[in-house]
Image: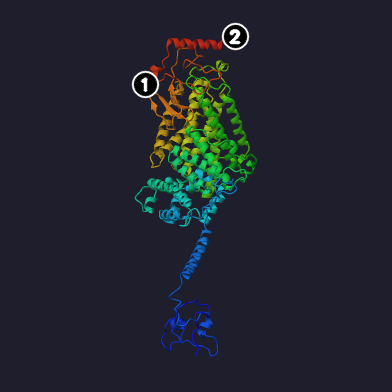
Amino acid sequence: MPTASSPASGHSPSVSKRRKIRKGTFSCWECKHRKRRCVFEPLKDSTCVYCQSRGIPCVSQEHADPRSHSSDGQISERICHVESLVNQLIRQRDSCQPQVQPVIGVRDRASSPRPREASISFPFQQLCKSLAALFPHPNTTALILTKGRFFSLPFETCRSPLRDQSAVCSGLAQSGDVFRLPYSTSHPIQFAQKLIQLALGLQQLDLASCLHPQLQLEQKWSTGDSARRYVDLAVSHVTSQDALVDSLDGLDTLLLQARYHLNSGELRSAWLIFRRALSIAQLIGLPSRNEQAGSRAESLWVQLVYNDRFLSLMLGLPCAVKDLELLNWQALDTYPPLRKLYRIHSVIAGRIIVRNVRLQHYNLLSQRQLDTTYDHYGVTRGINDELRKSARSVPIDCWKVPTLNNTLLDTDKMDRISMLVTQMHQYYLVILLHQPYLLLQLSNHTYFSPSAISPILPDYSYSRHVVVPASREVLSRCLEFRNIRPILSYRGLEHKAFVAAVTLLLSHILGHRSGSENVLEHQRPQDLAMIQQAIDTLDELCTSNDPNRDSAIQTRDLLSKLLSIEAEAADGIIYISCIEKDSVGSDDALCGTSHQGLKFSIPYFGVICVIPGPVPNLQNDGLLAGSAQATGPQGLLPSTLTQLEFDCGLNSQLALSSNLQAEMQLLYDWSLEPNVLNEG
């Protein structure tokens, strides 16, 4: 009878040593394991019928069992096969989720090519698992982002530069990407981005409402503490590491982080983050001339520069990037109107900063120019012309004031918010451009009649007239946000409302010096009512748990005091302004009040004091209030009372001596002498 084949037959592995088997045993190992009879066809090969039908090796029991003694190579091969199957499944799942996009089309790095960030190295795998465990339930995440109105925040409407906001919002809502938590295999930057989005959503929530996120999250922390915790986790584990933010998604996450600090009133922290993001953007090759207009890389670069410049205007700091690196003028007309203005405003904001920094180099205390070749007002009028041209470069429909209310769909709301913010920034830049010259005229302690002032002082009346309507436009648009947000929870809106209200009140205080010739008198009731609305809105913020509560209290108190000063000026009391000694370079904190005066910070120019001026006994057409110096043709802004101690006896400090009155009277007589004025 044929016997089972030896290992040399078929495909069985070679075995050097034979086993001793029991007499009468003829079945192969496969038939033995299957407990079946091993049958051989007569006069055929030595493979049994069962093994032959299945094409498997027929190994006699006199050799080792191949099942019990598999070689290490076979085991390793099987493991590799299983791992390859797992990797295929992972790649298929990752292809269905957003990937971290590396910069495309930028100049090469000096080092070796950077690997795609979607492939996570081993040290970050445990980090991703830990971050994934920090997120709340997906339903809670969607609730926070929806009720917190994250996607209708003013800054969020600028994240998609070319498509309209309604298309963006509807597309995100349909896909569900905005509420989807990152996969455990995602890049760490995606976890950080979602954590900061949750923090921004929590930041907007009103604790007095029926929604209590701290209960949904099953946490012991309050809403504000939970938001801070999410940001701290994202910063400590991800965004603080340069290697993890070295991408477009990393820059986008840094933008969100800076906006969280901005809304929390931490302006300097936000400014530092923007500067770091700009540095990282330059390291990865932005801006690139080869980058297409409207691409994600180009849009992120413009957003970084835009935010850096507007925040620098708030803090009184220089800008980081030159205009040559900012805007592709040839592609400007390819943008939609609002995106076109967005980029133009970035350029104009930078030029206002450059002018203000040049003015900082003047010796404000002694009113002497250190650079007599710089025509600051000529530069101002040139920037003003650019603002006028930018307004004319877009259709008239772009200047219709949109209305906001809670009945609007999110898609319509985002479009209208984007239009409101762009319009507001146009007029906000007008205020910042001309505000120094309003302060200069208010600081003229030697006040002349209109017939006598023109030959001596430069004519800054255009600046005084243009800031008034611009302030009204900014203030009215800030108030429009009350219709969708009972509490002003965006710090940028509070700041712009404050700047507009202060400028409008100072204009009225200056206008009251003209008596019956005050051209602002007819609009005064409406202006004061609008400012009172802003104060009432700040009252709502002061009674909430908003992160800007403290700054809102200071802003409200300051505006209320300035409103009282304006009422006194309307009754005939002359008020003047001056720079507090050694105040240039002070921070952005609001200042307080003392006695009958008020002081507050103006970026780039220091702490401005508004105080009642003494009224010397001079001619009716002569000098009404003043100091010993008049501002000459090359006068600077603003003038100062160097001996003034603001907190100690204003009336006694400001009393003019008889010698000073005589000097002022002599100056008045000199201004009326035609021969003197015509000399030279």
Which residue is farthest front?
16
Closer to the camera in the image, 183 or 180: 183
In this view, 585 is above or below 481: above
| Rendering coords of residue 183 (x, y %) | 47, 57
| Rendering coords of residue 608 (x, y %) | 45, 26
Q: What colour scheme governs how the chains and residues are painted in the rendered image of this protein?
A: rainbow
Closer to the camera in the image, 241 or 390: 241
In this view, 182 is above or below 631: below
**Which mark is first along the chain, 2 or 1?**
1
Instruction: Please say whether residue 520 is visible from this viewpoint.
Output: no
| Rendering coords of residue 648 (x, y %) | 37, 21
Mark 2, other Cα within 10 Å: few <14 / some 14–19 / many ≥20: few
- In the rendered structure, the answer to whether residue 672 lies left or right of residue 653 reads right
Quadrant location, the C terminus:
top right
Closer to the camera in the image, 603 or 145: 603
Q: Name the mark on residue 648.
A: 1
Q: Are marks 1 and 2 in contact (CB under 8 Å)?
A: no
| Rendering coords of residue 312 (x, y %) | 50, 35
Q: How many marks?
A: 2
Q: Which residue is mark 2?
A: 675
Q: Name the mark on residue 468.
A: none
The residue sitting at 54% across, 26% down in the picture is: 464
The amino acid type found where label 1 is placed reads Cys
Closer to the camera in the image, 520 or 250: 250
Instruction: Please say whether residue 247 is visible from this viewpoint.
Output: yes
Mark 1, other Cα within 10 Å: few <14 / some 14–19 / many ≥20: few
In this view, 513 is above or below 268: above
The amino acid type found where label 2 is placed reads Asn
Tag 2's secondary structure? helix
Q: CA distance from mark 1 to mark 2?
A: 43 Å
Tag 1's secondary structure? loop
